[in-house]
Image (cartoon, rainbow, N blue to C red):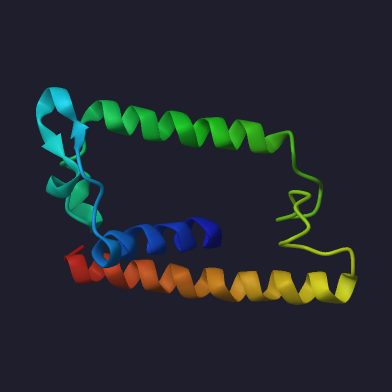
Amino acid sequence: HGRISMLATMGYITPEITGKFPGYLSPSKSVEFKDIPNGLAAISKVPVAGWVQIFAYCAFCEFNGMTNRSEAPGDFGFKVLTSADPEERKRKLQAELANGRLAMMAIMGMFFQDGL
């Protein structure tokens, strides 16, 4: 949940800071990227085909990730996040847990600010 919350937090604030993509999200329905609000209000604005694409991509990532992981939780064999040194690996994983917990609180605060 921590990694998803980190992505959700960045996905929530990034369009506010950098702006949104130019062009159409759905040309057939004349929905532009700038028409999609941030937060929970976006759920009703994104076309059904967009949600199908999002869920299909998430399913692809989940099924593909199941073949690449080891027995240790959070270890996907990517040594930038972990390390061969047990002490450094422990420190990095503890930092990731702390950041994930902070991101969970941050995204919940953003949802409540939206009027959840």
Q: Position of residue 116 (x, y in %)?
A: 21, 62
The answer to whether 11 appears left or right of 28 in the picture is right
Q: Quadrant of residue 107?
A: bottom left
Vertical comparison of 47 with 11: above or below:
above
Count the marks: 0
Furthest residue to the left? 30
The answer to whether 36 appears left or right of 10 in the picture is left
The residue lying at 80 percent from left, 69 percent from top is 89
The residue lying at 39 percent from left, 64 percent from top is 9
The residue lying at 47 percent from left, 32 percent from top is 57
Task: Compare residues 45 and 13 and report the one nearer the observer.
Answer: 13
Task: Compare residues 37 and 102 and report the one nearer the observer.
Answer: 37
Task: Compare residues 19 and 91 and report the one nearer the observer.
Answer: 19
Vertical comparison of 16 with 37: above or below:
below
Furthest residue to the front? 22
Vertical comparison of 18 with 99: above or below:
above
Furthest residue to the top? 28
Q: Position of residue 69 (x, y in %)?
A: 75, 43
The answer to whether 68 appears left or right of 54 in the picture is right
Q: Quadrant of residue 23?
A: top left
The residue lying at 33 percent from left, 62 percent from top is 14
Furthest residue to the right? 85
Q: Position of residue 76 (x, y in %)?
A: 74, 49
